[in-house]
Image (tube, helix red, strand yellow):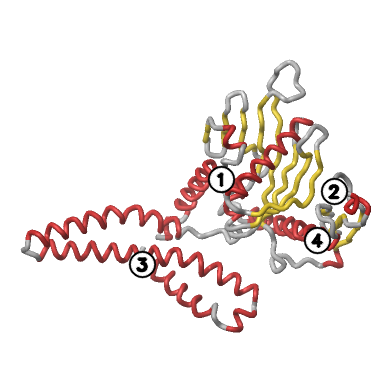
Amino acid sequence: MLEKIQIIKQRFDEINDLIIQPDIISDQKRYIKLNKEYKDLKKVVDKGLLYESLLNNINEANEIMAEEDDAEMVEMAKLQLEEAKEKLAPLEDEIKFLLIPKDPDDAKNIVVEVRAGTGGDEASIFAGDLYRMYSKYCSDKSWKVDVVSLNEGTSGGFKEIIFEVSGEDVYGTMKFEAGVHRVQRVPQTETQGRVHTSAATVMVLPEAEEFDVELDMTEVRIERTTSTGPGGQSVNTTYSAIKLHHEPTGMIVSCQDQKSSHKNLEKALKVLRSRLYEMELAKKQAADSEKRKSMVSSGDRSAKIRTYNYPQGRVTDHRIGLTLYDLSNIINGDVQKIIDELMLAENTELLKANDDVI
């Protein structure tokens, strides 16, 4: 492990020198990439220094116990040895997890698309519940949420809602939410008290930076229209709504959230870039499926990933067989406990696949 840490330390020192060079600072794409690598490596380097210090303490204590005649010194060395050994094992585990190769997309902001699936009005209401759950979760983590577009359900909730989330390591955390979410409960419209099953699909796309996706604007047709739905007179009477048609793929992206057509265009382009990036990412993952077939991180959005059962107050994540009887808190934004378990499962899988890393 020390050898691996030393290699990382050399790379860390190299980046430390690079990021202060004027030609690197002026190259935004390279500077951002190096800065991110610097932050990731610093975590390993800091833990590595602590690890080296503990090993030195152990060696020192062993030497004193072998060579020293003074009983008091030997006793102090024993205490030092016990204390160092106690800290060593958990620190080794921490470093092992830090040495797992990171997904470069984990640090990105995201675009989330929540769509009502089977279940009619109840599915739209559930999609609204999921949006509120994620909004509360993001707020608790001090992440910023911006709605890009929405299509309201006839009895509440949303047929579809698209929103951006920005903050620290957003994709690395929220990617586990992608998939089909299922709800079992008695709908508000049900008179016989029967439990119905409905579903909503959540897509989590890493937000593509301008330098991630080369978007040829000659292939994008921009349509400007008046907005529909609530928003006040100025929104509904000016041509501020934007609809983008990406000719090569047939993708259509709409945005009417802002009063300014310029801001709507900016948001719509972000979503289009993210969808194109996700499409390229999906191709790459399909070509490299063996490497990414971990049960948690495969990203198969057609799979049912979680069930919210209201009569039993139960939430079950089917990917790892986790069941929690805490539905009311989870649906109110306390999703972290589930994400923590999913992260642990993914890291354990990655650790098995990367045994040669240590």
For residue 21, say whether it is visible.
yes
For residue 254, say whether it is visible.
no
Q: Is residue 164 above or below residue 335?
A: below
In what element is the residue under mark 3? helix
Q: Is residue 181 above or below residue 79?
A: above
- Dot 1, crowdedness within 10 Å: few (<14), some or many (≥20)? many
In the rendered structure, are the residues bearing label 3 and label 1 in contact, judged by CB atoms less than 8 Å apart? no
Rounded to the nearest whole Å, what is the CA distance between mark 3 and mark 2? 56 Å
Labels 2 and 1: the sequence-earlier one = 2
- The residue at the point 76 percent across, 35 percent down is 124
Rounded to the nearest whole Å, what is the CA distance between mark 4 and mark 1? 36 Å
Look at label 1 and name its amino acid: Val
Measured as percent of width and height from the top left, residue 260 is found at 84, 60
Rounded to the nearest whole Å, what is the CA distance between mark 2 and mark 1? 40 Å
Q: Residue furthest front?
A: 233
| Mark seen at residue 263 | 4
Q: Mark 1 points at which residue?
A: 296
In what element is the residue under mark 1? loop
Q: Which of marks 3 and 1 is in front?
A: 3
Q: Which of marks 2 and 1 is in front?
A: 2
Q: Nearer the viewer, mark 4 or mark 1?
A: 4
| Mark seen at residue 49 | 3
- The residue at the point 58 percent across, 24 percent down is 312
Q: Mark 2 points at which residue?
A: 231
Q: Which of 64 and 191 is in front in this view?
A: 191
In what element is the residue under mark 4? helix
Measured as percent of width and height from the top left, residue 150 is found at 79, 46
Rounded to the nearest whole Å, what is the CA distance between mark 3 and mark 1? 32 Å
Look at label 4 and name its amino acid: Lys
In what element is the residue under mark 2? loop
